[in-house]
């Protein structure tokens, strides 16, 4: 099963959540993470096909690079321009191919029962002309983990993303609120007050970068993820 990790914006904590969750999942099941597409990256010496976000996944999960990373399966497309994937690809005279992404995902799913796929930016970021991230995810029916944070403006961005995900008939597995001391208590409570429906379903998790503040948060998120397969079997 593939679970998609997205956010309300770029630099919102998707990589951090994916890497930490991967580390917890691998204590219980065979799991791997991938990055749908990486932009804003110059080729790494000796690791030209390895995404920098994937390297961070591995560091956070306490594991080395895997053969699948070195083969380019965990991030089939890497572009230099720090921009939307469709534009970054165009700047290099390329067009991202959905078939190539689908093939990489299929190979990973064949070897690992659990795949965490981190997106680039938000769900409506265009991967190629006529193809958004949500188009790709929606066609595959992946459940979604949404990462948000209690900053000014995040309520609107959070709900726009939730409505987009649900409009495709996808499962919203969890909403992760990336806590930061940079944002005040009023903004935190304001955001949480709008998520009560999902909080009542046990789908809202506040997670801290400091493990001492968040000793069991990722374990709870891992259990939510693992329960997805049970629910799928029951349905």
Image: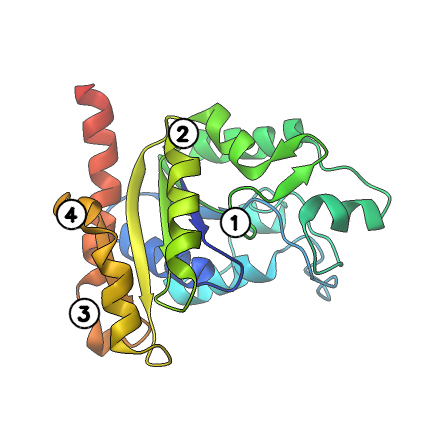
- Residue at 21 percent across and 62 percent down: it is 217
Q: Position of residue 145 (x, y in %)?
A: 35, 46
When the figure is inspected, residue 16 is found, relative to residue 161, above or below; the finding is: below
Mark 4 neighbour class, 10 Å CA radius: few under 14, some 14 to 19, many 20 or more: some
Q: Position of residue 135 (x, y in %)?
A: 55, 30
Cα–Cα span, label 3 and label 4: 17 Å
**Alpha carbons under labels 4 and 1: distance apart:** 23 Å
Q: CA distance from mark 3 to mark 1?
A: 28 Å
Badge number at residue 215: 3
- Mark 3 vs mark 1: which is more N-terminal? 1
| Image-based side of 13 in relation to 89, left or right | left
Q: CA distance from mark 1 to mark 2?
A: 15 Å
Towards the viewer: 156 or 62: 156
The residue indicated by pointer 1 is 122
Instruction: Decide if residue 5 is on the left or right side of residue 212.
Output: right
Residue sitting farthest toward the top: 235
Disc on the earlier residue, 4 or 2: 2
Q: Secondary structure at mark 4?
A: loop
Residue placed farthest to the right in the image?
93
């Amino acid at each position: 099963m593939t679970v998609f990790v997205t956010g309300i914006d770029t630099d919102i904590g998707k990589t951090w959540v994916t890497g930490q969750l991967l580390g917890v999942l691998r204590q219980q099941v065979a799991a791997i993470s991938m990055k749908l597409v990486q932009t804003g990256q110059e080729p790494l010496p000796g690791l030209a096909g390895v995404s920098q976000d994937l390297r961070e996944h591995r560091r956070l999960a306490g594991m080395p690079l895997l053969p699948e990373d070195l083969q380019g399966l965990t991030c089939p497309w890497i572009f230099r321009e720090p921009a939307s994937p469709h534009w970054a690809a165009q700047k290099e005279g390329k067009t991202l191919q959905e078939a190539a992404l689908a093939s990489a995902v299929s190979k990973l799913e064949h070897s690992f029962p659990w795949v965490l796929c981190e997106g680039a930016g938000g769900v409506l970021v265009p991967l190629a002309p006529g193809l958004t991230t949500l188009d790709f995810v929606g066609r595959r029916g992946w459940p979604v983990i949404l990462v948000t944070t209690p900053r000014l403006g995040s309520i609107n961005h959070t709900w726009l993303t939730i409505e987009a995900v649900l409009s495709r008939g996808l499962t919203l597995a969890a909403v992760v609120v990336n806590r930061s001391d940079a944002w005040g208590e009023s903004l935190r409570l304001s955001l949480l007050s709008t998520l009560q429906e999902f909080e009542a379903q046990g789908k809202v998790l506040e997670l801290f970068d400091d493990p001492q503040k968040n000793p069991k948060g990722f374990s709870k998120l891992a259990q939510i993820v693992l329960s997805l397969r049970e629910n799928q079997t029951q349905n």
